[in-house]
Each structure stands twice: as structure tokens, then as C-alpha cells.
Image (tube, helix red, strand yellow):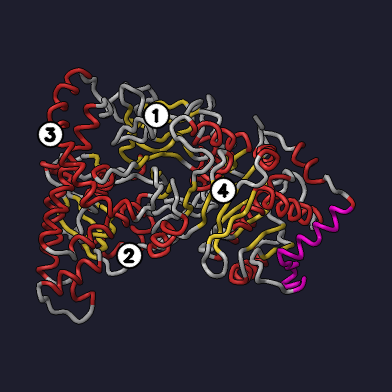
Amino acid sequence: MAKTLSRLFKEMVDENPDLHVILSKDENGVFQPTTWKELYAQAKRLAAGLISVGVKRGNHVGIISDNRKEWLQSDFAILGIGAADVPRGSDSMAGEIKYILHHADCAVTLVENETQLGKVLSICGDAPRLATLIVLDPAYSTPEEKRGGVTVLSLEETKKRGDAYLQNEPDCYEKAIDQVDPEDLATIIYTSGTTGEPKGVMLTHSSYMHQVRAPHTPIDVGKGDVFLSVLPIWHSYERALEYFAFFAGATIAYSKPISQVIGEDLVKANPSIFPSIPRIWEGTKARAMRTVRAGSPVKKAMFYTFLAVGTWYSKVRVLFRGLKPQFRKRSRLLDMLVSFLPLLLLTPLNLLGQVLVFSKVKKRLGTRFRFGVSGGGALPPHVDDFFAAAGVLLLEGYGLTETAPIVSVRDCRRPVPGTIGPPLPEVQVKVVDENGDSLPPGQKGVLYIRGPNIMKGYYKKPEETSKTIDKDGWLNSGDLAMMTHKGEIKIVGRVKETIVLLGGENVEPTPIEETIKESEYIDQVMVVGQDQRYLAALVVPMRDALEEYAKQYSIPYQEYEDLLENEEVCTIIMNDINSLISPKRGFKLFERINRVHFLAEPFEIGVEMTHTLKLKRDVINERYKKEIASLFPTR
């Protein structure tokens, strides 16, 4: 097998020239296919064009763009000539782009459209190495020009330069591909980070080649499969999944993470596999529940009845199949005996529920849907349980940008709920205590990772690299985890997120937040309470649900903010929180939420949240410090 992404690209083209590699929308919103042969031809032209404007082996080339076929052309063009790309999405702020392009020493950058062109031009004075900008949007046809001391080219003009270069050097791309080494840098991905300055994660061809090989063990993917892509392609999670899908012979259909578009594209593209993040799966569940609440009392009763049946059936089936996570050793025979009769009784009711109720949920995912993959954050248990009850296979995975990123994922043949599955082949993991000693299954500690997928380091930050990767190659994930006796991993929190109360109690906020979001009235939440006597929370309510409640019970209000101050509304939300965070649900008394402050505006991506929708706790703490202070009045 090829040892670099570039070589593998060439092999796929030679072996599958007419196979569809991507589906992208035309101006009418219709998915149009691109074959491997067509992709290669365009990537080769662009690669020659990049060489003609001065890009050399080992250079770093910026890409500021969202998902589109031209992004993929750019990626394979850059990798093929032995350079490394430095990607970022179009929603990035100018200051963020300035830092990244300057820090990464990018002389050439590809931008998606005129909007991104203007954004990058506005920071050129602070990125003195930047010399050439190339606009990817085919609609941009302005002739070559100098703007702010930078040469601006259209994509087609760059390719025409490539055509001229290829007349003298027709095999330049193929020769360059052969010279790429597995340990050559493929990309520098800057972490959004929940704290601190972005760090440039250096990933090699070898790191990504592991991601191409290893997921075949837990995930069954091949020719004929279609992935629906809604996550930003520049992000490590989406990028690794795309390489994996492409080189398995599958096809990627490019969508965008907007609820209405996702719904339409699930029908248009009819994918067999849908990789996404927890927030989108939460949204899918929420839309289904809103539809139920708007239905008749009979339909609501039927839905909730079969939801309960499906939930119990899935849990009993997991027990019968020996898939319950074993943090303590269990008797396989006893589990089978205990679960056999309930499984027998629940099976016909569950089958009826699948036909009468959940077939409608599945229909929204398309007619050939096989499974979804959830990554980029913890999958809330209530969402996991909902899709299990609906008979929808959802595989939770885990990784970090620093691990290229996939470390583990549930096996599609034998998925163990409540875990992120076992580590991928060739990846080693261990859970250690505060002294660095390995812990046995069932005990909580910090997760360490070692393997061929680990990053080369942080660009220009050797001290940060040494803090993260020890001399033996073990990477400190910063996540708290437990192992099962069968080798699956369960993530239980983040080291830096742990809240320490005045009484000395250590609290992991994430499980509390995910449980609170089970409330139909709560959209977002962040638990606070460091060095305080009790826990409190900032809560972003589900606006549609609150307004629907107000309408149903004739609660008067003029502005939405008035509704958030209404005593009845506050009471119903607090009652929900208290019922969810209770001893009956396994929470301790000190984990109870004593006070809340309601926020009218949701947390924004790129401001209070990362691009994978993780809370930037330090930003939120600073932005809402007055509101947080009001939750802990001094005596």
C-alpha cells in the first residue's frame, strides 16, 4: 500500500478513474459528481500553477475556505508537490487569520471568494511574507492584479499558468508525488482552543495514512457508500474521515451545517453514512420531539409509549449480546439469563414501534442510511438512548487534533454504548493517576495516547510540545477517562474543566451540562462554581419551546427577554433542572444546580464556542463575569 496521501491519490486515480469521489452542488442546488480522473486533472493543473507562482517542497500554503470541490483540488495539489496546507474556515475572524498566516509563514494563500479575499487583504500588512492570493470561486474572473502589495489571481488564471508550465514539464506533478516522504508535513491545523493562543498542530502524511488504514477495523465502509459532509473540511475530524472515505472507494456529498439544508440534502444525497457532531444529533432529536409535541394527544401518547419500549428493548438487547460496558467484571451467563425473557416480550412491541413511529424518524435520514458517526465532543446519553430506541445505529468516536484525530470509535458490528469504543489498531492508550501510575479498569484518571497518528508537534512551540508529549511518546490528552475490562474507553470530563467547590468537592461539569440539556426548554448551558459553596449555571433557553409554552398557557409578554423574567417560566425550567440533576439520576447532592442566570442570546461559534461546538469556558467566564458574580452573592 502507498505510504503517503499523494501516492495513494495517484493509485486511486489509476485504479478507479471513473468512480465518483465527490458530489457538490451546482448553482441550482443539484448534486453533480466529480470522478477521480477529473479531480486528478484539476489538481495537477493547480499544482503546476502553484509551482509557477513559487510554491516549493516544504512550503506552507494557506487555505481559507469552506467545503467545496475546489478545496479538495487545492489539498491534493499542495500535498502532491510536497508542500503543507494551513487550512481555516471562512467564518474565521480577520485577527485569527492574521495570526495563523503570519505564524505559519504562508507566502501563498487560497481564499474561497471575494469576501475572504477582502478579509485577508485587510491583514496583509501584518503578514509580510504573504505575496500571492488565489481565489477559488470560479465566479471570480478578475484578471491578475496587485492589491496592497499582494498579487491576486483567479483559480482559472492559476490553472492556465499551470498549463503553460506543464508544456515544458509534463511529468512535474508525478515526479513531485514520488518525492514526498511519509514523514513530510501534510498540514498545520491551528486549534481553535477552549483556552489560550491557537497552536499549530503539525500532522504528517504518515499520521493521516494511519487514519486511512485503521478505521476499517471498526467501521465497515466501501465502494457504493455515500457520506454526507456537513462539518468544516479544514477541521481534523472531518478531514480524516474524508481521507478514510475517499480511499475506501466511497463518495462524499458536500452539504452545510444548517438544519434546513441538512434535511434537504439527506433526501437529495441519500447517504449511507452521516458523520457529524453531537450538536447536530441533538438537533435532529429536538426536531423530532417538536413534531411530536405539535401532534394530537393520541399520537403523543403512542410516541412516548413506543419510545419507552424502544429504550428498554435496546438496553435489554445490549445486555443479552454482552455489550454492556464492563467497568466491573460481569457474568455473561447471568446477563443472558436476566435479559432473555424481557427481550422475548419486548421484541414484538419494539417491532410495532419501529413501523408505526420510528420509521418516520429513519425516513428523514434517507432510504439507504446505515449508520451515523458522532465525534468532536461528547455524545449526550439521552441522545444516544433516543437513537438506539429508534433503531438508528450511532457510533461515537473520540480524538484530538493532535492525534490526526481518531483515537477510537465504536465498532459498527458490536457497538458498546456509553463508551467511545476501543482504540484503533496500532494506537496505545493508558489511564493514569496524578502520580503517572497506570490505573486498572473502572478507575478514573487522565488518558494518555501513543501511536503512529500522534502529531509531530506544535509549530514553533517546542516547549508546548514537550508539555504535551513525554520522552516516551505518550501524549497527554487532558481528558479524564475510564477503561472497561474489555478495553473500551469512556470519557468522563476534562482535567482543566474540573470545578473545585469550597468544600473540596471535585465536579466534572460536562455530564451535568449534557443531562440538563435533556430538558426540552434548554438549548445551551454552562455550569459554574469554582471556589464557591455551590454550583450555578448560565442557561440559554430553547426560544421556540418557551414561546410555544407561553402561547399554550396564555402567558403575556412583549419582548422575549420579558419571558425569561417570568416567574412561571423560571419555575418550570428550574423544576426540569432539579428533576434531572437528582440522586435518582445518579448525581450527588453537591452537584445540584442552586441558581441559574438566563441568557437571551446563544453562545456563538468562534466567540464562546469552538468550531466543534465546545464551550470556551474562559471566554464565557470573562464575557459574563457580572452575570456569574450575581449567582454567588456575598453575605
Q: Are marks 3 and 4 in contact (CB under 8 Å)?
A: no
Q: Amino acid at mark 3?
A: Leu
**Residue at mark 3 to residue at mark 2: CA–CA distance:** 44 Å
Q: Is residue 481 above or below residue 83?
A: above
Tell me the residue that label 1 is attached to: 422
| Residue 247 as seen in the image, left or right of residue 583 | right
The residue wearing badge 4 is: 189
**Mark number for residue 602?**
2
Q: Which mark is residue 30?
A: none
Position of 599 relative to 101 (above/below): below
Q: Nearer the viewer, residue 337 or 376?
A: 337
Question: In percent of the image, x 54 and y 70: which residue is there?
Answer: 28
Mark 4: amino acid: Ile
Q: Comparing marks 1 and 2, which lies closer to the viewer?
A: 1
Q: Is residue 148 magenta?
A: yes
- Residue 89 x/y as whole percent: 54, 59
Tell which circle, 3 or 2, labels the residue nearer the N-terminal end.
3
* Real-space Cα separation, disc 3 to disc 4, in angstroms: 52 Å
- Is 290 in front, or is 152? 290
Residue 27 visible in the snapshot: yes
Q: Tag 1, which secondary structure?
A: loop
| Secondary element at tag 2 | loop
Q: Earlier in the sequence, mark 1 or mark 3?
A: 3
Disc 1 residue crowd, few under 14, some 14–19, many 20+, Cα 10 Å: many
The span shown in magenta is 143-167
**Label 4: how many Cα within 10 Å (few below 14, some 14–19, many 20+):** many
Give the residue furthest to the right.
Answer: 168
Residue to which mark 3 is pinned = 345
Horizontal arrangement in the rendering, residue 355 relative to residue 155 (left or right)? left
* Label 3 crowd bin: few (<14), some (14–19), many (20+), radius 10 Å: few
| Residue 60 visible | no
